[in-house]
Image: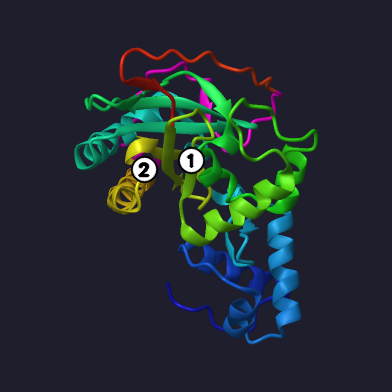
Amino acid sequence: MSEPSGAPPIESVDRALQLLTVLHDGTELSATDAAQRLGVAASTAYRLLSSLVYRGYAVQGRDRRYRLGPALVPASARALTAGGLRALAHSSLETLYERTSETVQLMVLERRSIRFVDGIESELPLRVGVRTGEKMPAHCSAGGKAILAAMSNADLDRLYQTGLPPWPTAKLTDLGALKRQLAQVRQQGYGRNQEETEQGVSGIGMAINGVLGQPVAAITVAIPSARFTRDHIDECLAALSDAAAETADRLRGAVAVADAGAAKLPAESPPDTVVAVHETNPEHTTTASVTRVACRMEGNG
């Protein structure tokens, strides 16, 4: 698009629109970046970006960079049925299972808990069982930690204002300890669970980011603790990273196709079952019973 000639009627509005154009192209900006692009002081750029955030046209991440906000993202990019998510992620789960031979699972965050929405169980004699449809506290799960790590401390304070929900084998019992561990998760890029969901069960998990750059789900590899060695973790991490990236790519592609009206996501769940990072309905965490049969372990990543 060619540049318009002459001075803009309202310079401040024109500057804000210039920033929107950049954000709409998928570019992320710091206040300094925006100031350099516009040729203005950093304080001016910050005020413009803050106005865009106020109206939902931009969002600021933990790294203090700004990206396109929900006000300019189509509804199809902000909501996805659980069935649609399973359809997008299942082939990645299959590949992840083939590469690791371990149980792999897909989960979403529901307030302070994670819910398992899909999984493939290992065929090894000693294995972790899938728990599709079940829930447990997010702060105990590798995948739950990967999703929680994208939240700000203020969001975590609001989410856990009554404390961490109890769980029999939980190792994190206060919000301060959770925040410290989430800082490590952000640094290393994945969540880790070592016998926090159940004795004998460990795992690693990575978040799947949606078009807004925030997690909409997580994929985990659930591993019996006897095989939870550094070498095996490293092997699984490479496969897990590929699976999370592939699913995120499919999600973005499906949104683009849906917006163009060329296709619709498969729906295996009721239309009102929506995958979201934050839920507003309160939930009550209960302790799930665990059954062991021979060498099969019921647990999760």
Amino acid found under the numbered disc labelled 2: Phe
> What residue did someone put label 1 on?
194
- Is residue 185 a member of the stretch shown in magenta? no
The answer to which quarter of the image holds residue 94 is: top left
Q: What residue is shown at x 74% (from left), y 78% (from top)?
A: 44
Q: How far across and down, in percent of the image, does residue 196 sit?
A: 54, 35
Q: What residue is shown at x 64% (from left), y 32% (from top)?
A: 112
Quarter of the image with the C terminus is top left
Q: In this view, does 81 lie above or below 19?
A: above
| Alpha carbon distance from label 1 to label 2 | 8 Å
- Is residue 277 a member of the stretch shown in magenta? yes
- Residue segment shown in magenta: 254-282
> What residue did someone put label 2 on?
228
Decide which of 141, 109 is in the foreground and name it.
141
Circle 1 residues within 10 Å: few <14, some 14–19, many ≥20: many
Q: From the image, give the main secondary structure of the stretch colored magenta.
A: loop
Decide which of 93, 199 is in the foreground and name it.
199
